[in-house]
Amino acid sequence: MMKNKRKYLNEFLFLVNKNRRRRQRTCQDLICLFDGICEIINGQPRCTCHQVICTNEEEYFMNICASDGRTYKSKCDIKRQQCLKQYEIVLMYPGVCNGMLG
């Protein structure tokens, strides 16, 4: 149930941001998720992720297969990628992705 709510929220915020793209001029016009911070870059508001902070546990290196079908080296890598992509990426299982996610 919670997964569906998160998916709906991600889709809703994507559409809100997509519909605002033509008129985005300030950071008030952009919603940044996953610890993203809005900054004006080349005159346009952008979500930046250089401030994402990870715990020691999240920094622990191990192969992790995530919901986007990619293998990450740590939970922190997933956390950073969520911020960059601005959508939720869920840990599916420890290990290398085998191409079965869809």
Image (cartoon, grey):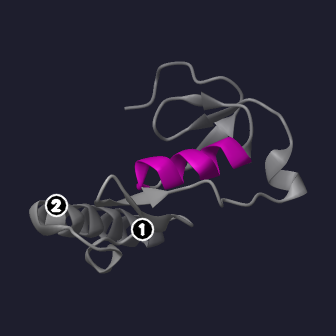
Q: Amino acid at mark 2?
A: Arg
Residue 42, placed above or below residue 20: above
Residue 88 position, x and y percent, is 46, 55
Judged from this view, the residue extending furthest toward the top is: 98
Residue 95 position, x and y percent, is 71, 28
- Residue 48 in sight: yes
Q: Which mark is residue 42?
A: none
Judged from this view, the residue extending furthest toward the bottom is: 28
- Residue at 51% x, 51% y is 82
Q: Amino acid at mark 1?
A: Cys
> Badge 1 is on which residue?
32
- When asked about the image quadrant of residue 92, the answer is top right
Residue 45 position, x and y percent, is 33, 63
Residue 60 in magenta stretch: no
> Badge 2 is on which residue?
21
Q: Nearer the viewer, residue 26 or 34?
A: 26
Cα distance in 3D space between marks 2 and 1? 13 Å
The stretch in magenta equals: 76-87
Q: Nearer the viewer, residue 92 or 44?
A: 44
